[in-house]
Amino acid sequence: MNDLGYALLGEEKNAAAIAAFELNVGAFPGSANGLDSLAEALIADNQLKRAKAILKQAMLLDPNLESAKKQLASLETPVSTKNSL
């Protein structure tokens, strides 16, 4: 299901990708990676508040998940700081 979500995300079919990732999370609620993937699709769809909450869930399940750490740090960085880099 994760592969399908990424295929859809690659085609910029964000809503369908989110649905696929949500199904994956429903089937594997303890998967930090599944939550991280869902957050990636939410970010692509500009659902940043929800993505941040999902990433925090992922970090509770796996505090060492690097992709979740990076995405969460990116969301918590003020926009003005990002633009000045």
Image (cartoon, rainbow, N blue to C red):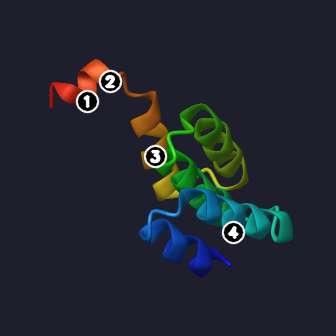
- Tag 1 residue: 82
Local crowd size for mark 2, using a 10 Å CA cut-off: few (<14), some (14–19), many (≥20): few
Q: Nearer the viewer, mark 4 or mark 1?
A: 4
Measured Cα–Cα span from mark 4 to mark 2: 29 Å
Measured Cα–Cα span from mark 3 to mark 4: 20 Å
Q: Which of marks 4 and 1 is nearer the N terminus?
A: 4
- Tag 3 residue: 71
Q: Residue 13 carries which label?
A: none
Q: Where is residue 1 in the image (x, y as percent from the top left)?
A: 68, 78
Q: Residue at x 40, y 38 (%)?
A: 74
Q: Position of residue 47 (x, y in %)?
A: 57, 39
Q: Nearer the viewer, mark 2 or mark 3?
A: 2
Measured Cα–Cα span from mark 2 to mark 3: 14 Å
The amino acid type of the residue labelled 4 equals Ala
- Tag 4 residue: 20
- Tag 2 residue: 79
The amino acid type of the residue labelled 3 equals Gln
Q: Where is residue 50 in the image (x, y as percent from the top left)?
A: 65, 37
Local crowd size for mark 4, using a 10 Å CA cut-off: few (<14), some (14–19), many (≥20): many
Image marks 1 and 3: residues in contact by CB distance under 8 Å: no
Q: Which of marks 4 and 2 is nearer the N terminus?
A: 4
Image marks 2 and 3: residues in contact by CB distance under 8 Å: no
Q: Which of marks 3 and 4 is nearer the N terminus?
A: 4
Measured Cα–Cα span from mark 1 to mark 2: 5 Å
Q: Which of marks 3 and 4 is in front?
A: 4
Q: Earlier in the sequence, mark 1 or mark 3?
A: 3
Q: Which residue is drawn at 63% across and 64% down?
A: 16
The amino acid type of the residue labelled 1 equals Lys
Q: Judge left or right: residue 11 versus residue 27.
A: left
Image marks 3 and 4: residues in contact by CB distance under 8 Å: no
Instruction: Check the image and report above or below for 83 versus 19.
Output: above
